[in-house]
Amino acid sequence: MSESGQPAEKPGRYQRTTGGLIGSMIVAVVAVLGVVIFREVFRDTPEADLQPVDYLPAVAALQDSGRQVAYPPTLPEGWKVTSVVVDRGPRPGWGLGILTDDGRYVGLRQQDESVDDLVADLVDEDATEDGPATVESALGSEWDTFSDEGGDHGFATEVVSGQGEENLLVYGSAPVADQETLIGLLTLDPVS
């Protein structure tokens, strides 16, 4: 009893039910999904515009230092080199990253490293060997081929250069026909 003689009121209790909990969870999930969908709809994702790289000066510098490197003197229209890799040291290496006219990647890597290591690093650790292929080029026509489950392919051959024997890998997500096009352009000739 209160001092005024009235019976004391008990504070109200919130009724907790499983239905109320599930309803609250549904409202929370819908709110989170709404925020995620709103962000995706109005997100302005910038596109990377990779600028072409002039790779022939790097080839000329390597040739001037006594290395013979495989390279394409020209590329098909719309293709562009986006990266040049030159590794110095005990196992020197050389490579190009190229985008085809439809934006697919094809790379070239020449190094004193085993084909298995190159394929594991650049194609896939679990790549399968698909057997030999004949692709005509100034470097020869016999190439070993590799692929992975994700659709990447690789073509490997041996190149006799000023450093001795090195392995060459042409690889990437570009279609096999594009990779074969690049292989057909490769030469060891001096840059003109």
Image: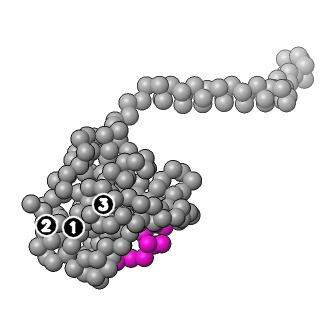
Q: Amino acid at mark 2?
A: Pro
Residue 147 horizontal/vertical position (percent): 51, 58
The answer to whether one can see residue 175 in this image is yes
Q: Amino acid at mark 3?
A: Ser
Q: Vertical placement of 185 versus 115: above or below?
A: above
Binning the other alpha carbons within 10 Å of mark 1 as few (below 14), some (14 to 19) or many (20 upward) gives: some
Residue 19 horizontal/vertical position (percent): 83, 26
Residue ID for mark 1: 188
Disc 2 to disc 3: CB gap under 8 Å: no
Residue ID for mark 2: 190
Does 153 sit left or right of 5 as displayed?
left
Q: 140 or 110, which is in the foreground?
A: 140
Q: How far is the residue under mark 2 from the one under mark 1?
A: 7 Å
Q: Nearer the viewer, mark 2 or mark 3?
A: 3
Give the mark nearer the N terminus: 2 vs 3.
Answer: 3
Q: Which mark is residue 137?
A: 3
Give the mark nearer the N terminus: 1 vs 3.
Answer: 3
| SS for callout 2 | loop
